């Protein structure tokens, strides 16, 4: 009898019935890196829940339950691993997140209930990110240091050094994480981030993450960018970096861990370029149609987990069914919740001020 | 008496010692220069930034997210135009996140003409700024107001833009800053960095006291009955001077209102004065097409059309691409004393 082939991370253990050996996987590997099965299943479940939420939001954009959709299908593998490793909390002791609008999996990994993504899509008054004001995926969670996401491409790169300045001065191991797409690195703000994060004697704990999907709306990156790797631009500033397959959670997890360890302890910037897919095009403005010729990180991870016996088809089906049920219940509830009222238009413009004679409280219309 | 720029510096010192200012920064803001106009000499929290206006505004926002209280300088407002989207976003952060994040930043920048600055050091910014909802915008015309408005800008938990009239930065005030020494030469010795090597220099700050000019409160600098003049910044002292001359020469008296806050503006004072005089002239030096003064004119027309005795009017900068270096250009592009005097005389004497 041939000796059974055991992939890395797979152990043969005696079957409970005592009638031979069965495989029981403890670790799932890609190349030389691996993650425990428990962690993989946690990541997998967040990826599926996020994808299901986003796909339902795309439907909402087409059914009239919402308008514009933009989000992160194709970035779930990397962004889940990011969210799970964030030092989550409020204030400079914790990580600040300057995200772009494809970071839904990061928020779900941080603990955002799916209904909060749906609420923003449904523009409800209960939307905790923006009270129905902002596009979907434009998160804002002060309790987790998630500063408001904007549609303006690249400006997060110049805001990030500011939170990092406070963190460096404050002490502790909190870091600033800033994420942007590959196309947005053409903005001068990307160079600003490198310059401000490496002022001699004032280097900053900034983790710069470039989600390289190879597109800027309709424009292929290869027609606009001559550089082979975006992280090479960091070399001039002494910013170490690595390119990682962002479609695979295992190397993504480890790249993020290495980067965070470096930034947390060295208090200097680090760069990750994650190669990812964009599975529904740029946004609903380009139809939000399913792209077939780019790898799907959810499918790939399912196949991998199946292949090594870390999951069975039944569990996969159940994970999808549960996510579907969670999302449907969330949509049903969100659509019943109150919408913003006309008197909400001016609210939250100004914080109360002891020195303003016209607006001691909020904005109330022209002086 | 302190100059306007010394007043700003003393306010920033008071701010960093007593009002929680954590960072005063921008291009050449830290030592050795302490600002191209000396506004930030000797300040404990002042530091130099890269030559990057977008970085300056973005970093100020980041510091504020994380609990700091920054004062950022744009060296000349002419160089702030590439930050307009960031300024817009700074103004919307509280609104966008329905109150999640306040944005307590102060941006100060020299604005307007009067230093022979030619094309790129003479522009005005208040009309652009007045379109940035979520911001508050102030522009002092004297040293004491500069001190009081800066302290209010620092204390206010919203983004505040402090526009400093370039032409008046070296002008001495007529009123003392609370705590400044009697002798202006003594003040100079205490807080002005010496020319040349400054390595060992440290300022000796006077024992300054708080003084707040509330936002949204204008100042009636001349009182009269023949017409209302609304202005601020460089043109304000010219309006006051013209009023004094016209009182002597023609027996005309004017309400001259120093707006001080561009937004929120003191509509109550303007409105009361227009009701009294029935005649109004709005003076500033920003370019005349879509000028902030036109908004005030709209309010006047909307709410006082039937109270007006003659057509309300504006005296503004010409809609030309720049202010030329030869003084023929500057003198004929933005309002000067003779233009202001002529316009004031006309609005006060036109037959009703």
Image (cartoon, coloured by chain):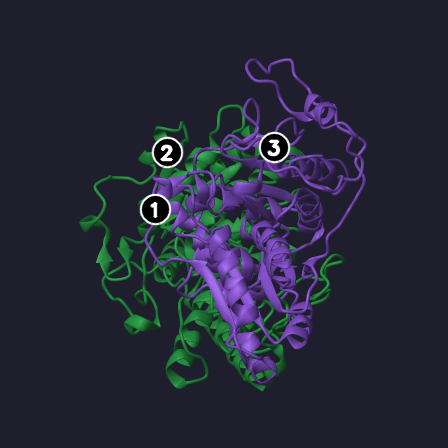
Can residue B347 be spotted in the picture? yes
Q: Residues within 10 Å of mark 1 (few under 14, many from 20)?
A: some
Residue of label 1: A185
Residue of label 2: A234
- Asked which quadrant contains residue B156, the reply is bottom right
Residue B228 locus on image (x, y percent): 61, 67
| Mark earlier in primary sequence (2, 1) | 1
Label 2: state its secondary structure.
helix
Q: Between residues B287 and B327, which one lies in front from this camera angle?
A: B327
- In the picture, measured across the screen, residue A29 lies left or right of residue A350, that is left
Q: What hue does chain B carry in this figure?
A: purple
Can residue A99 be spotted in the picture? no
Q: Residues within 10 Å of mark 3 (few under 14, many from 20)?
A: many
Quarter of the picture holding the C terminus of chain A = bottom right
For marks 2 and 1, give the CA distance: 12 Å
- Asked which quadrant contains residue B103, the reply is bottom right
Up/down of B217 relative to A365, above or below: above
Chain identifier of the residue bearing label 1 in the image:
A
Residue A292 locus on image (x, y percent): 24, 66
Up/down of A225 relative to B1, above or below: below
Residue at 46% of width from left, 69% of height from top?
A: A135
Q: Between residues B337 and A338, which one lies in front from this camera angle?
A: B337
- Do the residues at pointers 3 and 1 share their chain? no
Residue of label 3: B40
Residue B258 locus on image (x, y percent): 64, 57
- In the picture, measured across the screen, residue B120 lies left or right of residue A84, that is left
């Amino acid at each position: 009898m041939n000796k059974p082939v055991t992939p890395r991370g797979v152990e043969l253990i005696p079957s409970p019935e005592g009638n031979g050996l069965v495989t029981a996987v403890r670790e799932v590997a890609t190349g030389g890196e691996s993650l425990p099965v428990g962690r993989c299943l946690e990541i997998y479940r967040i990826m599926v829940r996020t994808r299901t939420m986003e796909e339902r939001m795309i439907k909402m954009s087409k059914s009239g339950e919402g308008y514009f959709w933009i989000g992160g299908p194709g970035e779930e593998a990397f962004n889940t691993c990011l969210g799970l490793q964030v030092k989550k909390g409020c204030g400079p002791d914790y990580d600040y997140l300057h995200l772009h609008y494809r970071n839904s999996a990061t928020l779900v990994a941080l603990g955002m209930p799916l209904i909060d993504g749906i609420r923003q899509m449904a523009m409800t008054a209960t939307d905790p990110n923006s009270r129905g004001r902002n596009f979907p995926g434009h998160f804002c969670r002060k309790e987790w240091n998630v500063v408001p996401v904007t549609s303006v491409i690249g400006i997060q790169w110049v805001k990030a050094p500011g939170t990092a300045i406070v963190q460096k001065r404050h002490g502790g191991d909190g870091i600033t994480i800033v994420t942007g797409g590959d196309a947005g690195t053409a903005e001068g703000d990307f160079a600003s981030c490198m310059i401000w994060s490496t002022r001699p004697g004032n280097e900053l704990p900034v983790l710069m993450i470039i989600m390289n999907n190879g597109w800027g709306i309709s424009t292929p990156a290869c027609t606009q960018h001559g550089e082979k790797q975006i992280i090479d631009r960091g070399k001039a500033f002494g910013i170490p970096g690595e390119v990682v397959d962002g479609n695979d959670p295992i190397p993504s997890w480890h790249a993020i861990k290495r980067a965070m360890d470096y930034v947390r302890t060295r208090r200097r910037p680090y760069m990750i370029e994650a190669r990812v897919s964009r599975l529904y095009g740029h946004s609903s403005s380009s139809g939000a149609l399913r792209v077939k010729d780019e790898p799907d990180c959810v499918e790939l991870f399912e196949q991998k987990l199946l292949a090594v016996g870390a999951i069975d088809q039944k569990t996969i089906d159940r994970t999808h069914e549960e996510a579907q049920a969670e999302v449907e219940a969330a949509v049903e509830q969100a659509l019943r919740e109150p919408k913003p009222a006309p008197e909400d238009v001016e609210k939250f413009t100004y914080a109360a001020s002891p020195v303003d004679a016209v607006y001691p409280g909020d904005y109330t219309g022209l002086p | 008496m302190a100059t306007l720029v010394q007043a700003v510096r003393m306010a920033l010192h008071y701010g960093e010692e007593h009002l929680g200012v954590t960072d005063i920064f921008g291009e050449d803001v830290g030592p050795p220069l302490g600002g191209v106009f000396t506004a930030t000499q000797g300040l404990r929290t002042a530091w130099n930034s890269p030559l990057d206006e977008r970085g300056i505004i973005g970093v100020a926002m980041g510091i504020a997210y994380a609990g700091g209280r920054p004062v950022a300088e744009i060296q000349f407002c002419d160089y702030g135009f590439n930050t307009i989207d960031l300024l817009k976003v700074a103004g919307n952060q509280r609104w966008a996140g329905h109150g999640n994040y306040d944005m307590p930043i102060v941006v100060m920048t020299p604005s307007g003409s009067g230093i022979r600055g030619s094309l790129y050091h003479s522009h005005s910014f208040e009309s652009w700024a007045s379109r940035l909802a979520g911001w508050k915008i102030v522009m002092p015309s004297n040293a004491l107001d500069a001190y009081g408005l800066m302290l209010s800008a620092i204390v206010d938990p919203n983004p505040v833009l402090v526009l400093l009239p370039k032409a008046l930065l070296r002008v001495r005030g007529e009123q003392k800053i609370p705590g400044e020494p009697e002798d202006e030469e003594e003040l100079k010795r205490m807080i002005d960095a010496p020319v040349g090597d400054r390595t060992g220099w440290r300022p000796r700050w006077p024992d300054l006291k708080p003084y707040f000019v509330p936002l949204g409160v204008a100042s009636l600098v001349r009182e009269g009955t023949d017409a209302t003049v609304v202005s601020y910044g460089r043109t304000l002292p010219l309006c006051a001077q013209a009023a004094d001359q016209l009182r002597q020469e023609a027996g005309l008296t004017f309400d001259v209102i120093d707006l001080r806050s561009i937004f929120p503006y003191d509509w109550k004072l303007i409105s009361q004065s227009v009701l009294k005089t029935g005649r109004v002239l709005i003076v500033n030096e920003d370019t005349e097409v879509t000028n902030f003064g036109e908004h005030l004119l709209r309010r006047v027309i909307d709410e006082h059309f039937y109270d007006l005795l003659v057509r309300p009017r504006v005296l503004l900068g010409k809609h030309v691409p720049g202010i030329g270096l030869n003084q023929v250009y500057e003198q004929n592009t933005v309002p000067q004393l003779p233009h202001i005097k002529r316009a004031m005389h006309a609005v006060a004497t036109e037959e009703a």
